[in-house]
Amino acid sequence: GPYKFIARTVSGSSDFLDMYYGSNHIISYSLNGNVGIGTNNPGNKLSVATAQGTTFSSAHLSLKATATTDTTGRTAISMATSTVNNYGVTLNARRYGTDGSPTFGINMHNNSSGGLEALSITAAGNVGIGVTPGTQKLDVNGNLLVRATSYLGNGNGDQTHINDTLYLGATDSGDSHF
């Protein structure tokens, strides 16, 4: 067939087993356990190299569900922070609500298989921190600490300025200040 495997040694590096389809390089396996797709010199456990795409279907890596579960189904990448199960962080895409709208979430696992969703972003662009889903552009359940001067406004020159002094419904001139 058109598939072929070629063993090679790179000076000062690892031994490789490369797979080709005809003359097209497909994948490289190194003796140290690294795998390269689109590259013949993988520097990580999995290296994927391809030109940047501009659409959803031209992503470098695609995780696809073979079946969907409305409102609770997730497609996720988990990153363990321990050798013991259920500790770490999960990046997940899921269907939410009665219409199955896509949402993105970051779950924190502290001896919990499901974890707690610490951050969520809805299809409408609402961000929830400590609340799922966020119902506003920024929806925070908990205390908020701002360590720099911040301006909140409506785009018409009216603003709230937060620094050492809190100005509500006023500009820096201090029409209303507490």
Image (spheres, helix red, strand yellow):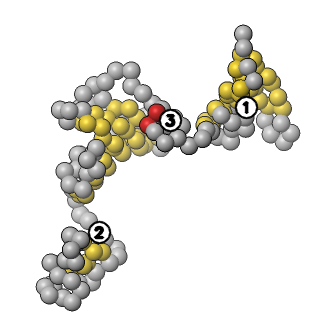
Chain-order first, disc 2 or disc 1: 1
Q: Residue at x 69, y 36 (%)?
A: 39
Q: Quadrant of the C terminus?
A: bottom left
Estimate the x, y position of residue 20 in percent, counting from the top left. 72, 22
- Disc 2: CA contacts within 10 A as few (<14), some (14-19) or many (>=20): few
Q: Which type of secondary structure does the marked residue at label 3 adopt?
A: helix
| Direction from residue 177 to residue 30 in the image, left or right | right
Say which of 19 and 16 sits in front: 19
Residue carrying label 3: 58
Tell me if label 2 and label 3 are in contact, CB under 8 Å: no
Mark 2 vs mark 1, CA separation in Å? 48 Å
Say which of 143 and 2 sits in front: 2
Estimate the x, y position of residue 41 in percent, counting from the top left. 73, 38
Amino acid carrying mark 2 in the image: Leu
- Disc 1: CA contacts within 10 A as few (<14), some (14-19) or many (>=20): many
Q: Residue extending furthest right? A: 11
- Mark seen at residue 30: 1
Evaluate whether residue 110 shows in this view: no
Q: Which type of secondary structure does the marked residue at label 2 adopt?
A: loop
Amino acid carrying mark 1 in the image: Ser
Residue carrying label 2: 145
Q: Which type of secondary structure does the marked residue at label 1 adopt?
A: strand
Q: Quadrant of the N terminus?
A: top right
Q: Residue extending furthest bottom? A: 173
Chain-order first, disc 3 or disc 1: 1
Amino acid carrying mark 3 in the image: Ser
State whether residue 13 is above or below residue 176.
Answer: above
Q: Residue at x 24, y 32 (%)?
A: 100
